[in-house]
Image: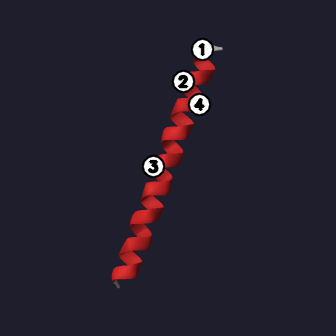
Amino acid sequence: ENKKSEDIRLVGVKISNLRKIDNSQKTLTQFF
């Protein structure tokens, strides 16, 4: 049970990191 909630949290962290990367790439393309 505890392991499952940990996995869900890790997935959430990965998704938020991907969104941060996606946003930074979008801001980079606006400069070029």
Q: Which mark is residue 27?
A: 2
Relative image position of residue 27 (x, y in whole percent): 54, 23
Task: Name the amino acid type tagged 3.
Answer: Ser
Query: Disc 1 on helix, strand or loop?
Result: helix
Give me the residue at 48% from left, 40% from top: 20
Task: Name the amino acid type tagged 4.
Answer: Gln
Q: Earlier in the sequence, mark 4 or mark 1?
A: 4
Label pair 1/2, CB-CB below 8 angstroms:
yes
Give me the residue at 49% from left, 55% from top: 14
Q: Earlier in the sequence, mark 2 or mark 3?
A: 3
Q: Earlier in the sequence, mark 1 or mark 3?
A: 3
Q: Please identify the quadrant where the N terminus is shown.
A: bottom left
Query: Disc 2 on helix, strand or loop?
Result: helix
**Quarter holding residue 7:** bottom left
Give me the residue at 39% from left, 65% from top: 9
Between the residue at mark 1 and the residue at mark 2, the CA separation in whole angstroms equals 7 Å
Q: Please identify the quadrant where the C terminus is shown.
A: top right
Q: Pointer 1: residues within 10 angstroms few (<14), some, or many (20+)?
A: few
Label pair 1/3, CB-CB below 8 angstroms:
no
Label pair 2/4, CB-CB below 8 angstroms:
yes
Q: Which mark is residue 25?
A: 4
Q: Which mark is residue 31?
A: 1
Query: Disc 3 on helix, strand or loop?
Result: helix
